[in-house]
Every structure is written in C-alpha cells, then in structure tokens.
Image: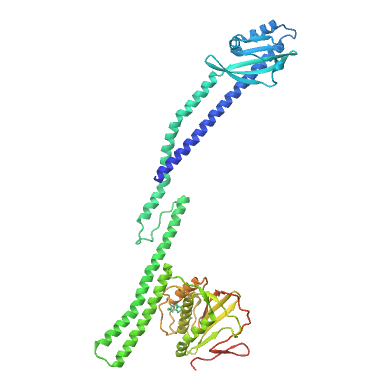
Amino acid sequence: MPIRLRLTVWYSVMFVAAALLLSATSWWMLRRTIDSTIRQDLQERIDDVRMQLQKSPPDASVMELRAALEATYSYRDDGKWLQVMRQDGIWIYRSRRMMQENVALAVPSGRPSGAVQIDFRQGGRTVRALFSKVSANGAGYSVETGMSMTKAQLLLHQFGLCLLLMTPAVLLIAAVSGHFLSRKALLPVAAIAYEARRITDRNLDSRLPVLESNDELAHLSITLNHMLARIDSSFRSVREFTANASHELRSPLTRIRTEAEVALFRPRSAVDYERSLAQIHEDAVDMSKLIDDLLTLARAEAGSDVLRMVPVDPEALIQEIANEWSGIVERLSIWLIVAAREGTSIEPLMVLADRTALIRLLRIWLDNACKATPPGGSITLRCESAEQFVVLAVEDTGIGIASNEQERIFKRFYRVDHEEAGQRRGAGLGLSLAAWIAEQHKTRITVKSEPGKGASFQISLRKAGVPANGSWAFKADAIHADVDGKVARRTLQS
Ligand code: ADP
C-alpha cells in the first residue's frame, strides 16, 4: 500500500475515532445533565408540596389540606403526576394520572429516609417519579411527584441522530483532508527522491536539497548528503588509487621496455646482455613488490585479508629480522643495533600477532630507515616491555621527517621529496600498509622525528601471557652493553 494511502487511512481512522469518542462523550454528558435537571425539578416540586402543607393551619382537616393542594396543583402541569399520603395512610392528594396508574405509596414511616427515583411507562410516554417523605406542622407525609420524559428523550434522540448523520460527513472530511495533508507532507520526500535519482557516479558531488524547516526530512537530507560525501570521497580515492597505481607501474615498465629495446637494437656482448638483464630483473622485482603492496592494500580495503593472530615471541622475531637485514645494512655502511632484554633465565615475552604481517611491518620500517640514513649512521631495532605492552621500534639517525609531514606519510602514494637523501624512491605505499597492519593489531604507529636527527617508528602490542618479571638490561648480537649501561656499537661492516 503506498505510504500516502496508508497515511490517509490512518488519518481518517484516527479522526473518525476521535469524532466518535467526542460524540459519545457529548451524548452521555447531555444525558447526565438532563437527568440531574429533572431530578432537581422533581426535588423542587417535593419542596413546594412541603411548603404548601406547611402553610396550612396545623389543625387543618384532610379535606382542607386536599382543597389547598388541589387549588394549587389541579390546573398546573406539575400536578399531573403527584400524590401525597399522610402518615396514617390517608390520601391527601392524588392527581388523575396517578390514580390511573394507581401506584401504591408507602406510609412515611415505612419509607427510607432518602429520595427514591423510578421510571414507569404510562400510555406512550415514560414518566420519571421521585418519592420522598416530608414533614409539615408535626405530621409526616409521603410525596411522590413525576415528570414526563418525552421532551428530554426527544432532545436526546435528536442529538444522537444529528451525531450519527454527522459521522459520514466527518469521515469524508477526514479522508479528503488526510489525503491533502499526506500529499503535502510527502511532497519534500518526492523532491528528495527526484534529486536522488539524478545523482549517478558521474555527479557524486551533487547534493540533495535541504529543507529550511529543520525537521526530520531536513535531517534526512543532511544525513543522505553526508553519506553522498563519504561515497564521493571513496570514489575519488578509488580513482586516485587506480591512477596512482597505473602511474607507478608505468615507470618500471617503461624502463624494462627501453632497456630491452636498446639491448635488442644491435648485437651486443654477453656482458652487456647480462647488465641489461640485471637491470630488467631489478625493475621486475620492484614491480612485483609494488603489485604485492597494491594487492595487499586492495584486499585490506575489501576486508578479505584477515590476519591470523597467534602468540609470537617479539624478541626472537627482531633477532630474525636483524639477521635478515645485516647483509643489506652492511652494504650501505650503516650500523644495525638490536636492543632487547638480556639474560637466559628470563621468561620470553609473548604478544598476540600475525607473524608474517609483523615481519612485513618491520621490513617496511627498516627499508625506509635504510633509505633515509646516510652511510655511517645507525638503525636500532628495539623491543621493550612496558607494563602490559611490548614496544617494538625502529629508530634511525637519518634525515628525519618534518613535523608537518608526519601525518601525511601514512597516506597512500605519499612520498617526501628528500633531495639530500639521493636514495632510490619507493611508491609511497609502505607506511599505509604498515598503518593497516598496526590497526589490525588494535594499535597505532607512533612517529617521533626531528629533521636532520633521525626518526623513530614504534607500536605497542598487548602482551599475550604473564608479563616478564622484569630486571631490564640490553643485549645485542651486534652490540655490547658497557658497564654504564650505555650502548656501544660496532658496525656490521667491520
Ligand atoms: P615508500 O614505500 O616510498 O618508502 P612509505 O609510505 O613507506 O613509502 O613512506 C612515505 C614517505 O615517508 C617516504 O617517502 C619517506 O620520505 C618518508 N619516510 C618514511 N620513513 C622515514 C624515515 N625513517 N626517515 C625519513 N623519512 C621517512
């Protein structure tokens, strides 16, 4: 059922229900008012009779009393239903209609003290009568006075009829106004839907109209606009990602192609072919690394690359990494220092991590540190226990990162142009991958750096087991700890 029709039906049902309730309440209130007015009238008549009896002399006979009452009531409508009996059972007065009805009247002593009301039918009409006992001039009397309910019933009947006749009219008004109101209320929704239909992937920068009413629909437009902004930014980043990836892949491909074309241009010596092949191989390795990074990022984006967390010994891990990188740093004439705990009896530190991902993160840091550190500088691989955490860090004494760059370096394809470094350049994907790995380990990378003095990248991983009992000292395969606790270094090259 369309929402407009539903609103109309709801509106009509509510409106009619409210109208019916109002009608029933008004009818009931009118009836109550009539009832209490009649009762008051009857009570006033009984009081009137009492005053008539009171006015008569105390020693007046039955005949005198009857004559006095007849003189007052026989010509008045009020006397149509009236009968008065004295306490000794003698009728003082009985109107003709009461005689026809011949309603018995108990003597005052046999009556309850309060007034009693009854309804009876006479001829075609309903009569309401009130019995009460009164006392006048020392004598007790039972008085019954009645009143025709015809007028009151007619009034009630006509009022009820009017209300019933009004119901279809109310229903019609409710349906028509419900239809118009729902139409008016849904017009902005139609406008929003119309605008939303016009938005495609080509004009994601368009926004839906926001009503000035500041109501729910305005909030809906604002929410949808925020959603559009997010989709727009995701689309942009996907487009940028594709453009950047193509751009990054083009350079090594062009180099490979040029190298091959130059080599094939004319016959060459075996040494020349070897050199060309070596160059092509290096570019192919760069490309594989780039494609690998791109794939990992794409999978991370799609959420399909889930890391498997297992207990890992971070000290053993950095030792392994140090061994892996010792040859590389040696060629670059850089010192490699491993800073970890000393002693054989200490409990191993354990963290919950994805081993492969953690190795990848350390490799990214080390690769960057090697690129940024000039020969003679040093790189420290650090593993420390800090309360419930294990801190893993790579520190270098390289060119450092300006503070305004420290946030941006985690963006994809972002590279800082270091003229002085003169090193080979990466694609700018390493740190965004590292940030994703850290995020998967529920932590963040912290960067500390001062341009010209080096940089330090670190993460804190929650310990998996019982924390180590803690006397700390540094040990290193490639370093010695001297007596002051200062770290003495020795180059791997020497
Ligand atoms: P890439 O793969 O090109 O190295 P990254 O995302 O790993 O890209 O790093 C982004 C930028 O951050 C690099 O261009 C580099 O200039 C800067 N950077 C990263 N690590 C260091 C560091 N240890 N010292 C100085 N600059 C660094």
Name above or below for residue 349 compared with residue 237.
Answer: below
Q: Is residue 445 visible?
A: no
Answer with the quarter of the image where residue 72 lies.
Answer: top right
> With 399 as the anchor, is 249 left or right in this view?
left
Answer with the quarter of the image where residue 223 lies.
Answer: bottom left
- Residue in view at x 69 percent, y 8 percent: 65
Name above or below for residue 144 compared with residue 345.
Answer: above
- Of residues 397 and 440, the one nearer the viewer is 440
| Total tally of numbered discs in the picture | 0
Q: Quadrant of the N terminus?
A: top left
- Of residues 93 and 305, the one nearer the viewer is 305
Residue 77, x across and y down, in percent: 58, 12
Residue 459, x across and y down, in percent: 53, 76
- Residue in view at x 43 percent, y 40 percent: 9
- The residue lying furthest to the bottom in this view is 494
Name above or below for residue 38 compared with residue 481.
Answer: above
Residue 454, x across and y down, in percent: 51, 82
Q: Is residue 235 visible?
A: yes
Q: How is the image coloured?
A: rainbow
Residue 106, x across and y down, in percent: 67, 15
- Residue in view at x 30 percent, y 90 percent: 273
> With 33 as the anchor, is 434 left or right in this view?
left
